[in-house]
Amino acid sequence: MECSWNEMAPKNVRALIREGKISGPTAGMSAGYAQANLVILKKELAFDFLLFCQRNQKPCPVLDVTEAGSPVPAIIAPQADIRTDLPKYRIYQHGVLAEEVTDITPYWEDDFVGFLIGCSFSFEQALINNGIGVRHIEEGTNVPMYKTNIDCVPAGPFCGQMVVSMRPVPEWQAVRAAQVTSRFPAVHGGPIQIGNPQAIGIHDLNKPDFGDAVTVREGEVPVFWACGVTPQAVAMQVKPEMMITHAPGHMLITDIRDETLGVL
Amino acid sequence: MECSWNEMAPKNVRALIREGKISGPTAGMSAGYAQANLVILKKELAFDFLLFCQRNQKPCPVLDVTEAGSPVPAIIAPQADIRTDLPKYRIYQHGVLAEEVTDITPYWEDDFVGFLIGCSFSFEQALINNGIGVRHIEEGTNVPMYKTNIDCVPAGPFCGQMVVSMRPVPEWQAVRAAQVTSRFPAVHGGPIQIGNPQAIGIHDLNKPDFGDAVTVREGEVPVFWACGVTPQAVAMQVKPEMMITHAPGHMLITDIRDETLGVL
């Protein structure tokens, strides 16, 4: 990644993405601004999906919902277009990944509703600002994610288990990690488990269901946070006729500063 | 109010309400448990109303949404029945108050969706626990509420200005009042204005739009919080064919402890 993207305003990075000059993962771009997961569904599923998110706010913190047919996330990035401003998308037809594309304009329909969901990048910055290292960033890999045995509260056809992300934290910093992230309920908030993967149905930290395994060092505990992959995973099980999501790591960069998402 | 209602478990108070043995306001009952505002609409309006709440979380923090046709708030009071377990209801037809009743079973339809919305009673307890007096409780009146010039973010047909409640706080405790209530985003969170009513379009504190005026003493500042009357006021403007709400102050007593709504 070019260093300058790190310091560039969100609208300028989005312009480069729109012009096809950026096609990789967005981690680190426009540092200090929140990034968002994207799920697009047809209007007929929108109420049940919004209700699912409302009932499961830790994994599914909604930052914005577009008007049916409008590609504009008016609250978090009013000049953006969700059809072109993310570097990569995944098109799912009847729950099967059909294609990865960099522009979804040809697929757009006038009953599409876009859900923009908070992303852990925001709270990772808060961890780093507090001197708590984030291992997968240090190791240059994707965060390890695991399916759990924690049932989400269902809504309409949407149901399934919570997916969590894991970051190893030195034992003496675990409470601080919980405090720091609790300030940010709009980006998953405090952890849901500290130190006992078995308790939530995770049996081998070296085999994440998504992303990459990371080193857990002597004196560190694994800390688990609800993960924004949950709503995608759950929506996929419903096998909607059409669903479009961001490709993992290829997020919408919003105009909202991370810190403004802090409730305290 | 009988003192014993204060210490009674929520399910026991709800049983007394259901049997018609309690018909007054619920303030103070089952102390320590959250109470909820109620708005019932037909399913056809449910998506836009939920979206309105999602976009305006400070005035409209959703605690639970019932399944269409089900009177059970499964998350916050799974044994309750919203048709009978609030002491008093208001029936609005085409936006006009048609009737006040103590049981809405005869009006119930199989496409009704109930929205249970967080209530300031929870954060008032937190203020009191921090030694910050709540004037309208001290004076035995209803909290003063005012229409503001703050536009809510619209959703479908739902739009309008935010309603706020006001509590006078000694100047030296105003910051503490902001800190204490910020812990509770599910019940309106931190204040939206401290000390300057004009700035939000309020010109006479002695003339609240709802509730009763209270004394503001020398050395006190008026502190304004987003108010759960907002979604009702907004829904009323849409003049839905049918809308049912709780009567002011006659809330659903939930099984959720106030403190569990704290994010920190």
Image (spheres, coloured by chain):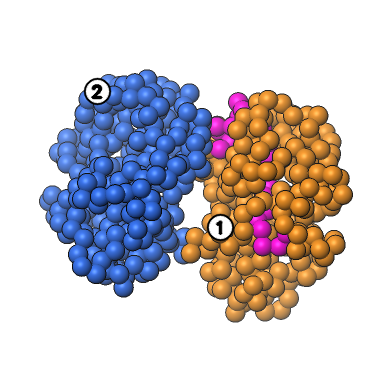
Chain colours: A blue, B orange
Q: Residue at x 76, y 52 (%)?
A: B12
Q: Say if A204 sits above or below B114 in the image.
A: below
Q: Residue A68, how many percent across, how many down?
A: 45, 28
Identity of the amino acid at label 1? Leu
Identity of the amino acid at label 2? Ala
Q: Say if B47 sits above or below B180 in the image.
A: above
Q: Residue at x 29, y 49 (%)?
A: A203
Within 10 Å of disc 1 (Cα), the crowding (few <14, some 14-19, many 20+) is some
Q: Chain of mark 1?
A: B
Q: Residue A211, how many percent across, how many down?
A: 22, 45
Q: Chain of mark 2?
A: A
Q: Which mark is residue B54?
A: none
Q: For the residue labelled by badge 1, is the local secondary structure a helix, a strand or a loop?
A: helix
Q: Is residue B146 visible?
A: no
Position of A101 compared to B132: left or right?
A: left
| Circles 1, 2 touching at the beta carbon (< 8 Å) | no
Q: Say if A98 sits above or below A88 in the image.
A: above
Q: Residue A201, how many percent across, how many down?
A: 36, 48
Callouts 1 and 2 in the same chain: no
- In the foreground, B183 or A145: A145
Residue B44 lies in the magenta-colored region: yes
Image quadrant assignment for residue B86: top right
- In the foreground, A151 or B31: A151
Q: Is residue A59 visible?
A: yes
Q: For the residue labelled by badge 2, is the local secondary structure a helix, a strand or a loop?
A: strand
Q: Residue at x 15, y 56 (%)?
A: A139
Image quadrant assignment for residue A111: top left
- Residue named by callout 1: B261
Q: Residue A220, how many percent across, how many down?
A: 25, 66
Within 10 Å of disc 2 (Cα), the crowding (few <14, some 14-19, many 20+) is few
- Residue named by callout 2: A98
Q: Which residues lie in the magenta part?
A: B30-50
